[in-house]
Image (tube, rainbow, N blue to C red):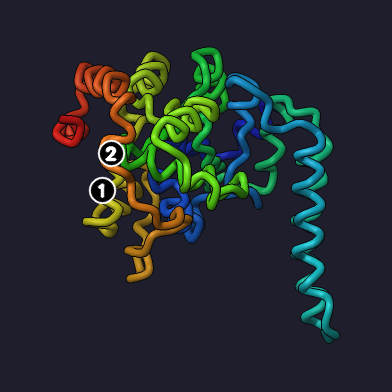
């Protein structure tokens, strides 16, 4: 089973982050390609659960995904539906139900992860856009490299201060206490970041260094988040060239923000205590040969 699934795929494409740096935007573009196969869930979090700091895939969480899918899908069948439309919708429902049942059942092994892409064809990449994957340890990076002879890594980097503040807002929304967090003092905001380890997603240099210990540079594409806004067409062309897939047409909607956090101005200097760590990460990126992050130093002055 393991070998068959490995050879039946074109390869794997993992977008490893960073969180709040445009992974959802890129997902929305690439999911229209017939050469890219995405599971029903964009973020699978398998590698972080195995090689990160905690398990994001306990049985209860996986079962909740199954239950949420059934709840969403039930709306498609509340009104009377005639044939053959009912058969078409039910076939699609059954296909996804099978996937979510497999996802929920586990156990979450490497074979389980591979089976999540069992519907991918030999001409397709199996795609996993889980930002948490950037934070895994070196053993996890080796496990990714062992998935297939062809594995492509995409890493999107964003100005670290902008990214961190966006992550603060997003995480507060996710936890359901945005109104409370936006009243926090400066000290409490810093504590909130540390308690939820939000700064770890911005340790670009450390994370990328691990991947480059294992992967050839030709298989790792590092993207500047600002290009999503400035030149989405050119950026998508670059990604398609990297993956050697047919170029995709980008609509005007591609210039719009996807999965954006709520509006809340960042108080000046509130993240200053994180500047030394950020500067060390920029130094590491420079030693790795990546030049575009150097302009972020000015925002730290």
How many numbered marks have been drawn onto this rendered protein structure?
2
295 lies above or below 100: above
Mark 1: few, some, or many residues within 10 Å (few <14, many ≥20)?
some
Measuring 29% from the left and 21% from the top, which residue is drawn there?
Answer: 281
Q: Quadrant of residue 87?
A: bottom right
Contact check, label 2 and label 1, Cβ < 8 Å: yes
Mark 2 crowd level (few <14, some 14–19, many ≥20, 10 Å Cα): some
Q: Quadrant of the C terminus?
A: top left
- Label annotation for residue 226: 1
Earlier-in-chain disc, 2 versus 1: 2
Q: Residue drawn 54% across and 26% down?
A: 195
Residue carrying label 2: 159
Confirm whether residue 151 shows in the render: no
Q: Position of residue 10 (x, y in %)?
A: 52, 40
Q: Which quadrant holds residue 232? A: bottom left
Give the structural element (helix, strand or loop) at label 2: loop
Residue 284 is left or right of residue 142, and the answer is left
What secondary structure is marked by label 1? helix
Which quarter shows the N terminus?
A: top right
**Whole-percent x, y for residue 191 in the image:** 48, 28
């Amino acid at each position: 089973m393991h070998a068959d699934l490995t050879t039946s795929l074109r390869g794997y494409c993992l977008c490893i982050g960073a969180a709040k740096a445009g992974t959802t935007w890129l997902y929305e573009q690439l999911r229209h390609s017939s050469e890219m196969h995405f599971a029903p869930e964009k973020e699978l979090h398998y590698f972080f659960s195995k090689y990160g700091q905690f398990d994001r895939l306990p049985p209860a969480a996986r079962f909740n995904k199954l239950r949420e899918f059934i709840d969403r899908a039930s709306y498609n069948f509340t009104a009377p539906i005639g044939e053959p439309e009912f058969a078409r919708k039910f076939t699609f429902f059954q296909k996804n139900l099978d996937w979510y049942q497999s996802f929920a059942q586990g156990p979450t092994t490497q074979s389980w992860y591979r089976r999540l892409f069992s519907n991918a064809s030999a001409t397709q990449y199996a795609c996993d856009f889980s930002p948490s994957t950037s934070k895994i340890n070196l053993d996890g990076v080796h496990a990714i490299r062992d998935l297939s002879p062809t594995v492509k890594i995409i890493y999107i980097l964003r100005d670290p201060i902008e990214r961190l503040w966006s992550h603060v807002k997003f995480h507060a929304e996710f936890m359901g206490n945005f109104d409370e967090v936006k009243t926090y003092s400066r000290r409490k905001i810093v504590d909130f970041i540390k308690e939820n380890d939000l700064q770890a997603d911005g340790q670009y240099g450390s994370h990328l260094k691990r991947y480059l210990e294992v992967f050839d540079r030709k298989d790792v594409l590092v993207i500047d988040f600002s290009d999503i806004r400035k030149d989405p067409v050119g950026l998508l062309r670059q990604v398609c060239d990297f993956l050697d897939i047919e170029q995709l047409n980008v609509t005007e909607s591609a210039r719009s923000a996807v999965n954006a956090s709520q509006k809340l101005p960042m108080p000046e200097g509130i993240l200053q205590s994180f500047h030394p760590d950020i500067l060390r990460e920029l130094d590491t990126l420079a030693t790795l040969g990546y030049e575009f992050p150097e302009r972020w130093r000015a925002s730290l002055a």
